[in-house]
Amino acid sequence: MNIELLLNESPNSEELRMLRTVIIEDNSAERENVLSFLAQLCPNVEVVGVASEVNEAVRVVVETNPDLLLTDVQITGGSCYQLLEQLRHKNQLDSLSIIFMTGHYDFNNATQAFKYAAVDFLVKPFSAKELQAAVVKVAKQKEPIQSYEQLSLLIDFLNSPQKNSERIAITLIGGKIQMIELSDILYLEAKASMTNFWLASTTHAVVANRNLGQYVDILHNDARFFSISNSLCINLDYLQTYDHGEQTVKLKECTQALYASRQGGQRLRQYLNTQNTISKSKFDTLKGLLSRFWGV
């Protein structure tokens, strides 16, 4: 990598606010790498503390009150979940921007949590330019890059990774973050490179600045959400009727019919047939038990 070229392309440091920064990394080689990148490319960063395990990290953050925390996801003595939980209890999250660093070994679980909370992260090994871009994003904003609600959602997800989240954070046009209850979503609709969130509680769509495919990927473990075409993903909890001949879907709380693709309609019919079979099987089992108990 041409460090000199990157230095020449660096943003004007006068345009960026100074960031008092703490680094949490238990791998000494990777920690030195981050320090080197910051020293070379981020003149607006002042490293005020370094830690390698959870309790030490909490102490350093409380003592230095930094603007920015650069933290690995997995650290000695726990993970960033334990770190964030302790910082939340000490009221240290309100004014703190966090850049998460994750390795491939914890990629799936961690990234799913980050996506639900709409929190940016760096995947190791990252380049100096990637780190610089993340720091510049923080420095250009007066407020923390994540809201308290986003970090709370992230903590809850990391605390119970096997449990479906009940909320999702979406990034609106202009960069603002909005928290949405999953139970309020009627359906998601592709709109060019953006996504319309149609909700039961509003008459207008909430427009997210990410494409539908990204949200389908985030929600793929939640059985409530079903893609009926490349441009529509419905919440099955609101499903009222499906006409396979017309390939039309009607949802509760929704006045207009939605159209499934040929493939999406076939998959929806198969899913509904499977659910009907399961329901009939459960009914027959219950009927058999009652017959044995009551002798009917």
Image (cartoon, helix red, strand yellow):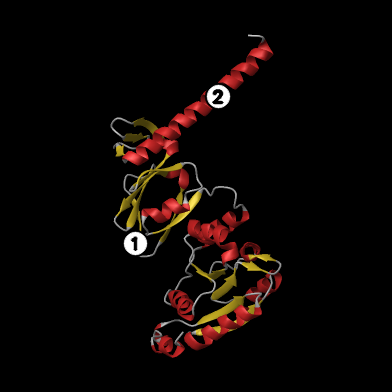
Residue hosting label 1? 173
User: On the image, which quarter does residue 156 sit in?
Assistant: bottom right
**Residue that carries the numbered disc 2 in the rendered image:** 281
Question: As drawn, is 282 to the left or to the right of 210?
Answer: right
Residue 99: x percent and y percent? 53, 71
**Residue 260 in sight in this render:** no
Q: How far across and down, in percent of the image, does residue 140 sit?
A: 42, 76
To which quarter of the image does residue 71 belong?
bottom right
Front residue of 115 and 152 = 115
Give the Cα separation between the discs numbered 2 and 1: 47 Å
Say what amino acid the circle numbered 2 marks. Ser
Q: Residue at x 57, y 68 (%)?
A: 103
The answer to whether residue 218 is above or below residue 28 is above
Indicate which disc, 2 or 1, sits on the residue closer to the N terminus.
1
Q: Secondary structure at mark 1?
A: loop
In this rendering, is residue 263 above or below 214? above
Which residue type carries mark 1? Ile
Residue at left offset 50%, top offset 58%: 117
**In the displayed structure image, the side of residue 156 where residue 136 appears, left or right:** left
Can you tell which of label 2 and label 1 is closer to the viewer?
2
